[in-house]
Amino acid sequence: MPEEHFIAEMQKLRKYAEDKELNLTHTFKGSGGKPNGIISKPRFKTALGMAFHQFQLTEEFISACALRYGTGPPDIHGGGYQEVLWRTFVIELRISIDNPTPPNPPNPFDPRIAAAMSEMRQIAEDSGLAMVHAMQGAGGQPTGVIAKQKFFMAMTSLLFTNYHFSQTLLNDVALIYANTKGPPDLRLGGYQEVLWRQFVIDIRKVPLPSAPVDDDD
């Protein structure tokens, strides 16, 4: 497949994945993807078809992905390699080939908040959380704004139910993502509304923790 065609298909795939809130890490792990980021080529193709079953994937594009991200011993029957770097595929799909520089982590964050958001991202990916759906279900508006108390409820009761939030951490996150154009919160400080959509976008950008997070402790 010509490079320009491959890039165009990857861009379409990225938009589809974002619109549908696909958790590709969860899909590939469920299809036999190993923690080291490797999966057999047949399982990679199956997982790709499952994740994008409503998207018109061509066999040419699937084969091009398997070849581009191929690894391991040569596939003497099908060509290319017997294994695929599924995690590399997911990462490159997220950051988009047309913008190969990964987005910067949210700023300004002190190490405490950066670590907490990294852990939340790990939980979200491992659990397949649909964060947009949860925020909207808690009262998040299409404009990306949500009342602060509803934001707290979504975080603690709908999304990260086993995460050990402190009120200080919740308040700090709400302040970082405060809708500064909205009314001030004279009782609790800060503002009465939170930019929930920007929070969700930034959660997807932060680096994953170096060690797995156990959210059941």
Image (cartoon, helix red, strand yellow):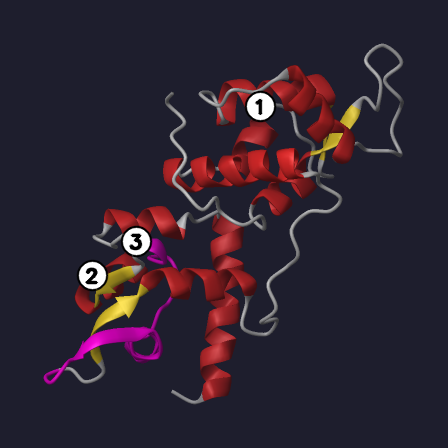
Task: Check the picture and name the quadrant holding the N terminus.
Answer: bottom left
Secondary element at tag 1: helix
Residue at the top extreme, as displayed: 187
Residue 73, x across and y down, in percent = 16, 77
Does the magenta segment cover residue 57? yes
Q: Which residue is mark 2?
A: 43
Q: Which mark is residue 28?
A: 3
Residue 149, x across and y down, in percent = 69, 17
Residue 104 in which image quadrant: bottom right
Q: Name the residue at 41% across, 35% down.
A: 213
In the displayed structure, does residue 130 sit left or right of residue 193? left
Say which of 199 and 38 sits in front. Answer: 38
Q: Which mark is residue 154?
A: 1
Residue 150, x across and y down, in percent = 66, 19
What is the C-alpha distance between the residues marked 3 and 2?
8 Å
Residue 62, x across and y down, in percent = 31, 73
Which residues, given as a range, are shown in magenta?
Answer: 51-77
